[in-house]
Image (tube, rainbow, N blue to C red):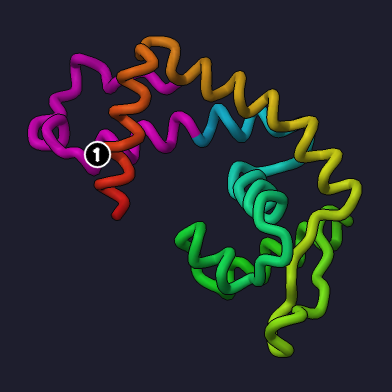
Amino acid sequence: MTSPPSSIVQTSMLDALLGYHLRRAQSAVFAELMQTLSDDQVTPGQFGVLTLIHENAGLNQSTLANALGIERSTMVGVIDVLEKRGLVARQKSKTDKRAHALALSTEGKRLLKSVVPKVKRHEKDIACTLSADEVKTLVALLRKVAR
């Protein structure tokens, strides 16, 4: 993880801002996860998309975008990339003729299965200075902040 600002630099007001610390933590965690997944050519965002599609067969792009808190147009681009790689397939929805149901391909399932242990190790590494109770508390607090 990224080290805290040098003690030479006065952070003044920033040091007391929750948003400042959230951004620094997110940047450090994201950078490390990108490195962890680099050999698999998967971004942290793509990992989240693959995971939710796997866990929610037939999910459409709009629902997926809402679940991840991103714009639908951004989701279309992510799905396009994953589809071109042969990881995700768009299928006609059985319930909404205007929407596509998303499914992982065999290759998508294989890739996800291979990266999950790496992500779990990464999670263990970033939480190594926290107790199990502290991790639960932190996750609960972050959920409250994210609303």
Helix or strand or loop: what does disc 1 sit on? helix
Along the viewing direction, whichever of 80 and 61 lies nearer the viewer: 61
Question: Which stretch appears magenta?
Answer: 1-29
Q: Is residue 53 left or right of residue 131?
A: right
Q: How many labels, in total?
A: 1
Q: Is residue 49 left or right of residue 80?
A: left
Q: Disc 1 marks which amino acid?
A: Tyr
Q: In the image, residue 22 lies at what x, y percent?
A: 30, 38
The correct choice, above or below, for 118 with respect to 77 in the image is above
The correct choice, above or below, for 114 with respect to 48 in the image is above
At a point 25% along the width and 47% down the height, the residue shown is 145
Q: Residue furthest bottom?
A: 97
Q: Quadrant of the N terminus?
A: top left
Magenta run includes residue 107: no
Q: Residue furthest front?
A: 95
At a point 82% along the width and 44% down the height, the residue shown is 109
Q: In the image, residue 143 lies at what x, y percent?
A: 32, 45
For disc 1, the marked residue is 20
Please tell me in which quadrant of the rendered image residue 93 appears.
bottom right
Q: In the image, residue 129 lies at what x, y percent?
A: 37, 10
